Amino acid sequence: MGYSIGQAAQMTGLTAHTLRYYEKEGLLPFVKKSGSGLRVFSDSDIGWLQMIECLKGVGMPLKGIKQYIDWFIEGDSTLEKRLQMFKEQKASLEAQMAQLQKHMNKINYKINLYSKAVEKGSLALVQNDPELLKEKERVYGNEQH
Amino acid sequence: MGYSIGQAAQMTGLTAHTLRYYEKEGLLPFVKKSGSGLRVFSDSDIGWLQMIECLKGVGMPLKGIKQYIDWFIEGDSTLEKRLQMFKEQKASLEAQMAQLQKHMNKINYKINLYSKAVEKGSLALVQNDPELLKEKERVYGNEQH
DNA sequence: GCTTGACTTAAAGTTAACTCTAAAGATTAT
DNA sequence: ATAATCTTTAGAGTTAACTTTAAGTCAAGC
């Protein structure tokens, strides 16, 4: 029900250093201190850290995450802003996933190409395989490498 | 068939500064210079830049990309290494996409939650909606925020 | 022939997000 | 109660990937 900074670090995969850094940046305004000044993380604090990891993972900078936390603290008057923020993150996430899928197609092409090249012992011998050229045109525009 | 650094910048969405920086870092070993010392980018160089963008986009650091280019220059003796590299990038990409999907689930939950909160004008009034709690448990482990 | 804008180099500066250091106080195991 | 370990603070250092600066060269338009 109350975790030390070391325990919180282990639970989240972050380091104690990073947790102090996050606190300094205003990302952990709910973490309490014990009588002797030690941080005490609650389950809710761990939940916040997991939300932070999520937002960080979709590419939000720490400043943007802090904005969300500040809105949360401000209360129900910021509900629309928070909803808007999540909608924007969803759109950004969809764009990212589409981009990654394109990269995946290119990389699959390369794996195909290099698999055949390794078989033959030569890249040049394989580059003009008509089957590969067709796939290449489908995946890329019209590149090399 | 030959592009100035400014044209190459426009074609790739990078800045001329960045292209010079990439060259300095060894990522553009094939770019030629004109008699007066100006860079001349070929279509193949543009293709390399697109491959660089792809690898950067899947999270490879410039050093790793340079390694690939160095292997390419070294020739067919490095075919296996290059194949291996692309296989690793594919695995990393798959992990990333799975992670992003998890984040997407959380964010969809938040959009759902905040949509209802905005409707009611209160987050607290909505937090305990049994329908939402069920979805929350499905999406998260057991968090707040 | 002069201005404007693109280009050259080398090197210093910027930003985000940590990461580490030092010196001291607190907690836990034996 | 004492050694080993954990935690505290403020502040300096690190890393990747640019980004800007300074000081100058080159080419095109009027």
Image: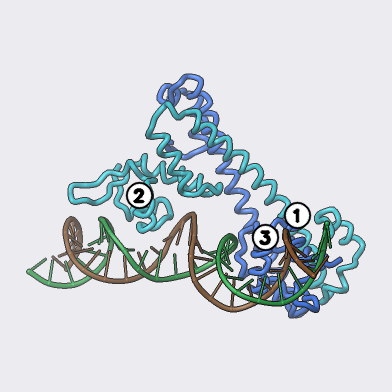
Chain colours: A blue, B cyan, C green, D brown
| Amino acid of disc 2 | Glu
Instruction: Say whether disc 2 or disc 1 marks the residue closer to the N-terminus.
Output: 2
The residue wearing badge 1 is B105
Q: Residue furthest top?
A: A120
The residue that appears at 33% across and 55% down in the rendered structure is B6
Spatial separation of the CA atoms under disc 1 and disc 3? 26 Å
Spatial separation of the CA atoms under disc 3 and disc 2? 36 Å
Q: Residue furthest right?
A: B130
Q: Which mark is residue A15?
A: 3
Residue C27: image quadrant is bottom right
Query: Do dots 2 and 1 share one subunit?
Result: yes
Query: Do dots 3 and 2 share one subunit?
Result: no
- Do we see residue A49 in this rendering? no
- Percent position of residue B134, x then y: 89, 57
The residue that appears at 60% across and 53% down in the rendered structure is A96
The residue that appears at 44% across and 41% down in the rendered structure is B67
The residue that appears at 68% across and 51% down in the rendered structure is B100
Element under label 2?
Answer: helix
